[in-house]
Image (spheres, rainbow, N blue to C red):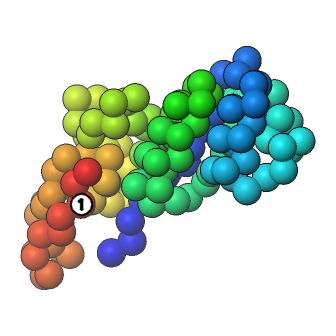
């Protein structure tokens, strides 16, 4: 079963110091000049369609450098909280394409969908 992609966003401008530029460069692979342009054009997508683990690490690295960053699930368009806890408290996944349990941004691990009924529950928790 396909897993959702996650996007890392820079949510605010203002963090343009050397540490911020180096963090954006490390996460994106862009040059320092392009990293500066990206930081100046917020909100901006820094990394797109990556697994949850990769997105969380990238956002954490940006935040440690003082860059305001957020992780968004591309399936349901919800933002993960800064503490990277599951999104269950914000209500179920609202995508029309998959059951709530299959969104990695939730803490649920199984459901009654055809896939889980056929192949067993899929552990997709954080």
Please state the horizontal and vertical placement of residue 75, each as a whole percent of the image: 45, 52
Please state the horizontal and vertical placement of residue 74, each as a whole percent of the image: 50, 50
- Visible residue check, residue 100: no
Residue 113, quarter of the rendered image: bottom left
Q: Toward the viewer: 4 or 8?
A: 8
Q: Toward the viewer: 116 or 20?
A: 20
The residue where tag 1 is placed is: 124
Residue 36, quarter of the rendered image: top right
Q: Quadrant of the N terminus?
A: bottom left
Please state the horizontal and vertical placement of residue 82, each as a whole percent of the image: 40, 29
Q: Is residue 7 left or right of residue 102?
A: right
Is residue 121 depicted above or below 29 in this figure? below
Q: Is residue 26 left or right of residue 109?
A: right
Q: Toward the viewer: 40 or 122?
A: 40
Please state the horizontal and vertical placement of residue 18, each as a whole percent of the image: 75, 30
Q: Residues within 10 Å of mark 1 (few under 14, many from 20)?
A: some
């Amino acid at each position: 079963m396909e897993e959702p992609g996650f996007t890392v966003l820079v949510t605010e401008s203002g963090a343009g110091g050397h540490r911020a530029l180096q963090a954006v460069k490390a996460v994106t692979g862009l040059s320092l000049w392009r990293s500066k342009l990206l930081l100046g054009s917020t909100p901006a997508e820094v990394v797109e369609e990556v697994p949850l683990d990769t997105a969380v690490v990238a956002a954490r690295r940006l935040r440690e450098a003082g860059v305001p960053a957020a992780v968004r699930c591309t399936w349901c368009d919800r933002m993960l909280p800064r503490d990277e806890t599951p999104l269950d408290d914000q209500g179920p996944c609202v995508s029309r394409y998959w059951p709530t349990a299959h969104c990695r941004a939730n803490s649920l691990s199984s459901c009654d969908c055809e896939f889980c009924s056929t192949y067993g529950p899929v552990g997709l928790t954080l």
